Amino acid sequence: MAVIHNKGWHNPARILVLSYLFLIFIGTILLKCPFTLKEPISWLTAFFTATSATTVTGLLTVFNGDVFSPAGHIVILLLIQLGGLGIMTIAVIVFSALNIPISIHQKLMIQEALNQHSISGIMRLVRRLFVFSAFFEGFFAILLAIRLIPEWGWGRGLSYAGFLSVSAFNNAGITFWPDSLSHYVGDVTINILISALVILGGIGFTVMNDIWDKKRWRAFSLHTKLMIIGTVILNVIGTVVIFLIERDNAKTLGNLPMGEAMLAAFFQEAMTRSAGFNTVDISSLEPASLFFMIMYMFIGSGSVSTGGGIKLTTFLCLMAMVSAFIKRKKAPVILGRTIHRYDIYKALTVTLLSIGVIFSALFLLLLFEQPGMSFLKIAFETVSAFGTTGLSAGVVSHLSPMGQVVLSLMMIFGKLGPLTFLFSVAQRENDAIRYPHGKLFIG
């Protein structure tokens, strides 16, 4: 991440963090207002819900359909949209529509928000990002409406379709139903449309932009090729693994016909990449499936996407580094391209910081929550919050107030990334001074 580490209000990372915190604050107030509620909720519940929506996570301590009014659903939808596209992106679109010039400092903030290496072409990417989001959300909302209107009628069918489309493309995973999408476990249309939206939202806007501009595989950037190949491989492996583990589990896939079982396995695997929808009971999954999904949630989706996690390219970069070291190569190589040393440092930093944040949160949850809670399920909930996935193994609704605060912080860390938080408070040091090399014994 190319960042200009200035002081005070000129620090792009600091402004990005504060803007998200401000949006969560406004969302909390709105979700506590009587016109957004069907029944009273606590300030903590409002804060947790606003945080989950803004960070496009989807973890909820209360059932969305029973607690919030239509106005509340609109507030949640707006928080999802603003959180998914990014506050800076929305601001730029508004400025452009009003013909307000964008300063260099504002472009630096957008660069920080979109994790770009330079400000060159940043405005075009922002405009494309908005167009891609509007097109996919609108197009898939129409397709979902065609499926849902016959079942729910025009009013509910249209509102459900629009809400699901925005929630899925932004990888939020929030629905109107207490069982998420479990009642559509065998519905091919719902499963394919929601999965497609989640994958498109999670693959990253830079990938979409690259495909739109170049249209030929050989012309694609290394990042685009890695994201496409990596996404396909992980989807295939995940589907097969979950199907094999759960095929004999009567509480999940065991009682489903072969075709529906494969569809459910694919859908649930795709959701672990950063979207909290489910068509099977997550709390009934085998321990091996839960652990496997923890790994997938930790990896997450693509950079400059609506998803979370350490990002797929970060994971692939580390795998290339390990392979290069084992083979005694001087530098890691992927698809005929040498990976820059800075990218290796960044991948290691992001991964280690993420592990540290997850371990810290897990320790606090184990310290404050009931001793009888399953360690694996608490770990699942922790990584789900960090990866802004939103899948729940049934623990989140039973958390103490302190546990809800911990998971809320995890969702914020996961959305913005540990690096952004550190850049927001750290000052850049002068590295012109060189020191003698020291030798360490490693391993």
Image: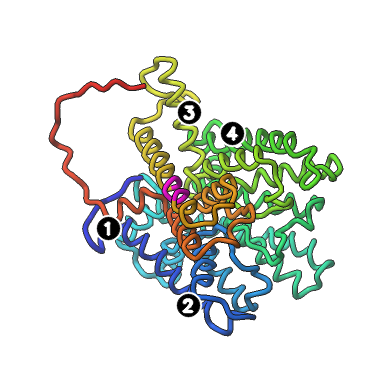
On the picture, is 141 further left or further right than 414? right
* Residue type at tag 3: Met
Q: Quadrant of the N terminus?
A: top left
- Where does the image place residue 430, in percent across and percent down from the top left? 16, 42
Please state the extent of the stretch shown in magenta in the rendering.
Answer: 358-363
Foreground tag (3 vs 4): 3
Q: Which mark is residue 11?
A: 1
Q: Secondary structure at mark 2?
A: helix
Which residue lies under the disc numbered 3?
Answer: 319
Cβ–Cβ below 8 Å for labels 1 and 2? no
Distance of label 1 from label 4 (alpha carbons): 36 Å
* Residue type at tag 1: Asn
Cβ–Cβ below 8 Å for labels 2 and 3? no
Residue 28: within the magenta? no
Quadrant in which residue 436 is drawn:
top left
In the foreground, 46 or 54: 46
Which residue lies under the disc numbered 2?
Answer: 29
Q: Would residue 285 be seen by someone viewing this image from the given angle? A: yes
Specify which label sits upstream in the sequence, 3 or 1. 1
Residue 360: within the magenta? yes
In the foreground, 174 or 409: 409
Distance of label 2 from label 4 (alpha carbons): 43 Å
- Where does the image place residue 377, in percent across and percent down from the top left? 59, 48
